[in-house]
Image (cartoon, rainbow, N blue to C red):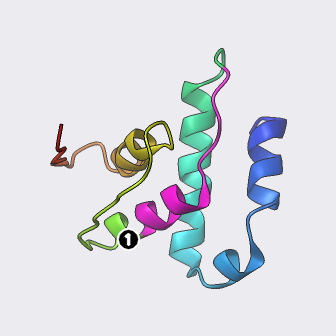
Amino acid sequence: LSLTARDTIENLPTDFTRSLSTTQHQQILEAFSRLDLLSQDHNVRFAKLFQLRCLISLLSAKHVVLRAATGSGKTLATILPLLLSPNKTAITVSHL
């Protein structure tokens, strides 16, 4: 992992990381690893806390309604689960 990815992981809130199961913790690390690999030559910000919570919920087969401001990272929240489950399909409903 890049230094930026490692720094981001290390600075996740402890109340969030303590609430994760071993499987969920592995899923978070895998998401960071894949995102880091895909963004090697680009200046990409790593996942924010709301995106990671969305990832955990979606990987747990829960429905998610995500409402956030323009430019806050909704697209990455949608893409992260697909990086870990490439054989799955996501349906995104967006009001334009």
Residue at 63% in and 29% down:
44
Residue 32 spot, x, y in % from top left? 61, 47
Q: Is residue 36 above or below residue 24?
A: above
Q: Residue at x 43, y 39 (%)?
A: 70
Q: Position of residue 72 (x, y in %)?
A: 51, 43
Front-lying residue, 96 or 2: 96
Q: Which residues are magenta?
A: 43-56
- Using the image as rendered, state which of residue 85 and residue 52 is in the foreground: 52
Looking at the rendered structure, the secondary structure element under dot 1 is helix
Query: Which residue bears the numbered disc 1?
Result: 57
**Left or right of residue 8: residue 51:** left
Q: Position of residue 78 (x, y in %)?
A: 35, 47
Vertical relation: 81 (above or below) 55: above
Question: Does residue 78 belong to the magenta stretch?
Answer: no
Residue under the image location 51 percent in, 73 percent down: 23
| Depth check, front residue: 39 or 23 | 39
Q: Would residue 31 be found to the left or right of residue 69 on screen? A: right
